[in-house]
Amino acid sequence: MTGRIPIFITGVTGYIGGTLLNRLLNHPDANTFDITALVRNSEKARILESKFGVKTLIASHAEHDRIEEAVAANHVILHIADSDDEPLNKAILRGLKRRHDTTGDLPILIHTSGTGLLTDNARGEYATETIYSDLNIEQIKSIPPTAFHRNVDLLVIGADEEGYARTHIVLPSTVYGIAAHPLVEAGISNPYSMQIPLLIRSSLARKRAGVIGKGLSLWPSVHIDDRLSRGTLFTVADMYIVLLDSILHHPDTTGHGWEGLYFGESGEHRWLDISLAIGRAMYELGLADSPDPTPFSHEEILKYFGNEWFGYYHGTNSRARADRARALGWKPTHSTEDMLASIKPELEVYAKKQ
């Protein structure tokens, strides 16, 4: 594609989306990108435009016609928000089809899902032996349509099969670390993740580290961003960049559709490992009488997680290997030990907010 590349990105006020936008703005080819960001806050839109030179569309996720129109005006769509909002995602797909039908362009979609797709109902009681590889297409096809995220993922893959777009799905796992970049400093993007902070906040509230069941279930993890990673490509933000670069420069050899699912993982942990790290940190900081976690009661699950399903989600198995992403040149180096070491500094942040 010649000339500037029109890119439409969602989720820039969030954790992953904001970090990715920062990476795009600092990309070696940034002067070839014509970026438009979807935002719902007019003040954040003003800052993005005036300070960062990013065009904006001020709209809610329910303004489907406007989003469809914006998608149709861009060659690359980076969808980082609301992976399970089916009407929103259908609007994005209509925009892709509209662009293809009216211009003949084959637009690109990088959709964000998650390794929650692979979860079971272990409730922390056991570790599964089933490990998914993003290179094993038949294994991925065997995932039932009722799985978490699966309804939208199948729509995205279907668009590729119908031939009006090249679609790719990034599936991050437990993303960790406090994001620190100019968009956070400007008050645009959220610097915090969801899974580990929720366990931290819940543990602080009950004054004892908590765990779902025995905490034996296994999940992968991946770091959000690291200022030391410039040029080394080992965080989840870098994974999107590696994929985007491959799509733009090697479109015929970059997996898409069923061959375009990319797990984001750089190590594996038990849920209990996280709870133990929270317990140690709370005990060392004088916030708990014991470093040992105790199981959340059913009442606590409802209180701290909002509902039973979401509570027991934090005791599921989700075992994945990012073989396809590594084959593209993504080189994650953060370990499970790095993830566990990140918990105390984050807990200190939330403890000060109490």
Image (cartoon, rainbow, N blue to C red):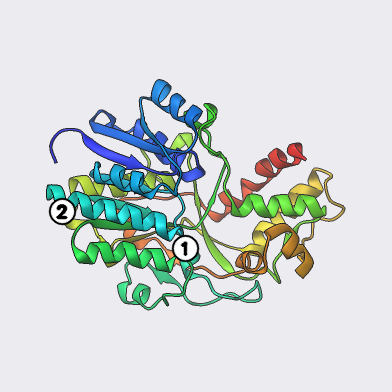
Question: Badge 2 is on which residue?
Answer: 101
Q: Is residue 214 left or right of residue 320?
A: right
Viewer-closest of 97 and 329: 97
Q: If the image is split into quadrants, where does the N terminus sit?
A: top left
Which is in the foreground here, disc 1 or disc 2? 2
Q: Residue at x 20, y 49 (%)?
A: 99
Q: Is residue 273 left or right of residue 177?
A: right
Q: If the image is split into quadrants, where does the C terminus sit?
A: top right
Location of residue 120 in the rendering, given as x and y in whole percent from the top left corner: 54, 74
Location of residue 217 in the rendering, given as x and y in whole percent from the top left corner: 60, 70
Determine if residue 195 is in view: yes
Question: Badge 1 is on which residue?
Answer: 115
Q: Residue at x 55, y 70 (%)?
A: 317
Which type of secondary structure does the marked residue at label 1 adopt? helix
Viewer-closest of 10 and 217: 10
Residue kind at label 1, given as amino acid type = Thr
Q: Is residue 247 left or right of residue 337?
A: left
Q: Residue at x 12, y 50 (%)?
A: 104
Up-down: is 126 above or below 181? below
Determine if residue 297 is in view: no
Q: CA distance from mark 1 to mark 2?
A: 33 Å
Q: Residue furthest top?
A: 50
Q: Residue furthest right?
A: 289
Q: Is residue 57 left or right of residue 222?
A: left
Mark 1 vs 2: CB contact within 8 A: no
Quadrant of the rendered structure where residue 324 is?
Answer: bottom left
Viewer-closest of 323 and 244: 244
Location of residue 283 in the rendering, given as x and y in whole percent from the top left corner: 81, 49
- Which of pointers 1 and 2 lies earlier in the amino acid sequence? 2
- Is disc 2 surrounded by few (<14), some (14 to 19) or many (20+) residues within 10 Å? few
Viewer-closest of 206 and 77: 77
